[in-house]
Every structure is written in C-alpha cells, then in structure tokens.
C-alpha cells in the first residue's frame, strides 16, 4: 500500500491562544515495500508526520493519500478503521499500552476490535508471538509477569496480529541496551523483508538509519529538507552537524582515516567491512601511507 503526503501542514490547537505550527509544506512519497527512516532534531516534526500516516492526525492543510483513501484538510473523515488496521504504529515504550489479563487476550484485542473472528484472532496471536521470538507458553500468563523485553515484544505482536501492510516505528528501541536494540531492529528488518512490509522508522539513531533504511528523510523546523539514500545523506556530515544531527560511527572513522591518509576514498561507507575493503584496495593500488 502506497502512502503520500502532499504539501501537508498541521497546526496544534487551532484558533486558540496556544495555536502552534508543527509541520508545513511536507511532501513525501512512501511506496509499497520501502524502508524509510525519518531523522531530525527533537521538535523537528518527525512524530507529527508519523501520526498522519494512519490518520491519527488529519492535516490542517494539504492532502494525505493512504492506499485508496484521501484525507483532506478541513474535511472530517469517518470510518478510519481500515486505515488503522493496515497501518500499524509501534510507539515509544509500547509495553505501557498493555492492559489485558493474559498475553493472548492482549494480542487478540486489536484483531477482535477490527472484526476478526475469535479463532482466527487466536491463531494470529500465536503466529505473531513466533514472529517476535516468543514461545506460545506465555499465552496464558499475565503480560505484567514478563520481563520488560518480553512485554515490549508482546506489545509489538499485538500490532503485527492486525496484519498491517505498513508498520510505523516511533523510536521502538527507546530504553533498551545495545544488545536488545539490535535484536528488536533485526526482528523488524526480517519482518520487512519476509512480508514485504512498508516500514517507516522515526529515530534519533543514525546507526539504525544507516544500517536498515533504503531511504532517509530529514525533518528540520517542521519542514522536510532532504531525502536520499543513506550514502547520499551521510556523505554530507558537515550539513548534518549544522542541523544538530550526528553521523554513524563508521562515517566518523572514515573521515578521520581520510585526514590521516590525505586521500579521499571516493564514497561514503556505512559498514566497517565496506570501509576495510576500500582501504585495502587503496593500498593494493599503491596508495600513499
């Protein structure tokens, strides 16, 4: 399912003394199957854009196309259930949204709410648990008896059980240690590939954006200012620093290495293996030390 934003504007608390412009003139295409990372400084508008992707927010200006539905400014939309089913959002700390007495009931809640028969919902719950790397043994347990990492995976399973075409991730690894973060991000990437999901990742982690995304979009002061491949985005480290952003550690290392060598390697590398191969090739061709 394709999603596109066309010159989208959003103002919070319109016609009140607290009215605030959050995003403006945002035009963004998200074709089926793409993995898009949205980066930007805190307050840049990333999360506001995210909430337009399944009509949690409706634009105060412009148009949002979600599949065959069109959400226009100043036109109140109804019957948004199908959109909410097809575009699943995993918010920060999703485990805080758990509330049922058993894991099975919690995962089944979304599908049942969208009209899925009970037996199918239970089947989806088992399948979703497997997808997030958990055993069916916990289905009858209270989610609040699980570890923090397990609770987060159960919450994610609840989103997956709705069978979304698009999954939107708002800082999904917040609060996790490096190992837990990598496990969760690898899991989402596997799901992205196996199910041909469109994946939209809102993140402060330049490492995750570089490692997983096909495309990166930069938000700054409510505007979309640049979009490109990870290589294109991170090849301009000075521009990112001016926006208050960082670059992946391997890019920092490459810049230091190039300064030491007095030689540019010709492109930006996003993994240490790629960088190592390029350096070896440089010296094999008689590069200066």
Image (cartoon, grey):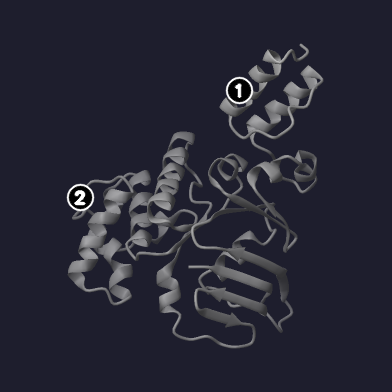
Q: Tell me the quarter of the image containing the C terminus.
A: top right
Residue lying furthest bottom: 75
For label 1, the SS is helix
Figure check: 248 above or below 70: above
Location of residue 13 in the rendering, given as x and y in whole percent from the top left corner = 66, 78
Residue that label 1 marks: 277
- x 60%, y 69%: residue: 4
- x 67%, y 62%: residue: 45
Q: Which mark is nearer the camera, 1 or 2?
A: 1
The reply to whether callout 1 and callout 2 are in contact (CB within 8 Å) is no
Give whichever of 45, 130 is nearer the camera: 130
For label 2, the SS is helix
Precedes in sequence: disc 1 or disc 2: 2
Location of residue 37 in the rendering, given as x and y in whole percent from the top left corner = 59, 52
Visible residue check, residue 59: no
Residue that label 2 marks: 136
Q: Residues within 10 Å of mark 1 (few under 14, many from 20)?
A: few
Visible residue check, residue 109: yes
- x 72%, y 76%: residue: 19
- x 64%, y 44%: residue: 230
Location of residue 180 in the rendering, given as x and y in whole percent from the top left corner = 43, 39
Q: Residues within 10 Å of mark 2 (few under 14, many from 20)?
A: some
Figure check: 134 above or below 7: above
Give whichever of 280, 249 is nearer the camera: 280
């Amino acid at each position: 399912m394709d999603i596109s934003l066309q010159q989208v504007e959003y103002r919070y608390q319109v016609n009140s003394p607290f009215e605030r412009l959050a995003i403006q003139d945002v035009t963004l295409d998200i074709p089926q199957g793409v993995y898009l990372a949205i980066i930007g400084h805190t307050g840049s508008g990333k999360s506001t854009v995210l909430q337009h992707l399944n009509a949690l927010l409706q634009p105060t200006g412009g148009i949002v196309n979600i599949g065959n539905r069109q959400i226009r400014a100043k036109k109140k939309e109804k019957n948004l259930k199908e959109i909410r089913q097809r575009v699943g959002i995993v918010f920060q700390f999703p485990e805080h949204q758990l509330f049922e007495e058993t894991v099975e009931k919690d995962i089944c809640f979304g599908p049942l709410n969208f009209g899925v028969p009970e037996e199918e919902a239970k089947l989806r719950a088992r399948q979703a648990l497997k997808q997030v790397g958990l055993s069916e043994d916990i289905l009858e347990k209270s989610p609040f008896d699980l570890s923090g990492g397990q609770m987060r995976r159960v919450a994610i399973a609840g989103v997956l059980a709705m069978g979304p075409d698009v999954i939107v991730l708002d800082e999904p690894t917040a609060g996790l240690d490096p190992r837990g973060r990598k496990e969760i991000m690898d899991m989402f990437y596997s799901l992205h590939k196996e199910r041909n999901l469109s994946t939209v990742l809102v993140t402060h982690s330049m490492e995750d954006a570089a490692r997983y995304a096909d495309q990166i979009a930069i938000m700054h002061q409510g505007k979309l200012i640049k979009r490109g491949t990870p290589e294109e985005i991170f090849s301009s480290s000075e521009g990112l620093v001016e926006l208050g952003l960082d670059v992946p550690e391997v890019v920092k290392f490459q810049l230091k290495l190039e300064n030491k060598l007095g030689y540019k390697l010709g492109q930006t590398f996003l993994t240490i293996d790629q960088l190592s191969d390029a350096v070896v090739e440089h010296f094999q061709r008689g590069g200066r030390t």
